[in-house]
Image (cartoon, rainbow, N blue to C red):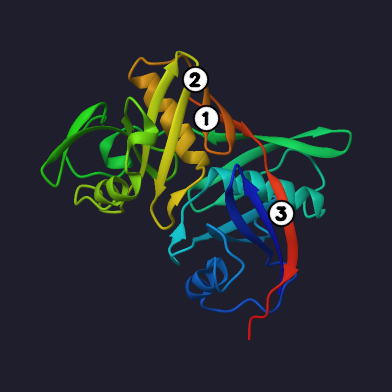
Amino acid sequence: MRFTKLHGLGNDFIVVNAIEEMDIPENLSEFAVMICDRHFGVGADGLVLVRHGEGVDITMQIFNSDGSEADTCGNAIRCVAKYAYENELVKKPLMKVETLAGIVVPELIIENGDVKGVKVCMGEPLLSREKIPMIGPVGRVINEPLQVEGETVHITSVSMGNPHSVLFVPDVNAVVLENLGPRIGKHELFYRKTNVEVVQVINEKEIRMRVWERGAGLTLACGTGACAAAVAAILNGYTGRNVLVHLSAGTLNIEWTEENKVFMTGPAEKVFTGDYKTT
């Protein structure tokens, strides 16, 4: 089975052209765990299968490294857009991509024939508790106290097609996120679990973020998480509507427009192409 590995700011994915490849195993959850294993497989945060779709240019199906299927993924969308264009699955810089969370529209930034970045309309942020989804009274979850094993933290929750809970802290590097992340992410109030971002405000235009992803654990970047973090910063009055989100391996530009659309702009890089023996 032919595959291509790509990454968006270190958040890496194994992308498979499911239109042409005939040797893809039937149990995709089990296969994702095997191929994403960093010791015995190719190694990645997720497996992405690209297919044709009705009324869209392509569809993408995403499995996390633990085998769970993801609704959407901002970094994967940029990687898939670059892959589809460079492999001539889509021969235009603006395309429609269907995910479980809905249709997203990436636009390639091309310079001298090379894809230098991708701008993606990520749609509208969902802010009501039931849309996140989260148990509790109707309304938004903004700087709300949450009891986590005897400790009180304050969260702002946002769905970007998948759930995120954002904590503002003085120093993101001082947080033991591998411990705090799953404690919040698997909290009983989040019956579909939640991604967890810790965010440090630098100034009214910049924030710094680390992320614990449901289904993958600590990752170097999360595109939907960066969108959620920017929206949370705006809701709490920390920043304006255009925010630079600094991650371990680079920066994403996030804009939440007055029309209630979130745009994400950032890079996608090809790492290598290879063949994986499936039997």
Give the mark, 2 or 1, whose residue is nearer the N terminus.
2
User: Residue 154, located in which quarter of the rendered image?
Assistant: top left
Q: Residues within 10 Å of mark 1 (few under 14, many from 20)?
A: many
Could you say which disc has been placed on residue 149 in the image? none
Q: Is residue 59 left or right of residue 166?
A: right
Identity of the amino acid at label 3?
Val
In the rendered image, which quarter contains the C terminus? bottom right
For the residues marked 1 and 3, what is the alpha-carbon distance in whole angstroms? 22 Å
Compared to residue 207, the image places residue 23 above or below, namely below
Q: Position of residue 94 (x, y in %)?
A: 73, 38
Q: Where does label 3 land, which residue?
A: 271
For the view shown, which residue lies furthest in the bottom direction? 279
Look at the numbered disc 2 and give the secondary structure of its residue: strand
User: Residue 161, located in which quarter of the rendered image?
Assistant: top left
Compared to residue 124, the image places residue 34 above or below, namely below
Identity of the amino acid at label 1?
His
Look at the numbered disc 1 and give the secondary structure of its residue: strand
Give the mark, 1 or 3, whose residue is nearer the N terminus.
1
Q: Where does label 1 land, which residue?
A: 246
Q: Where does label 2 land, which residue?
A: 206
In the rendered image, which quarter contains the N terminus? bottom right
Q: Is residue 260 left or right of residue 12?
A: left
Q: Residues within 10 Å of mark 3 (few under 14, many from 20)?
A: few
Instruction: Please name whichever residue, 115 or 137, is drawn nearer the observer in this view of the structure.
Output: 115
Identity of the amino acid at label 2?
Glu
Give the mark, 2 or 3, whose residue is nearer the N terminus.
2
Residue 56 showing in the rendered view: no
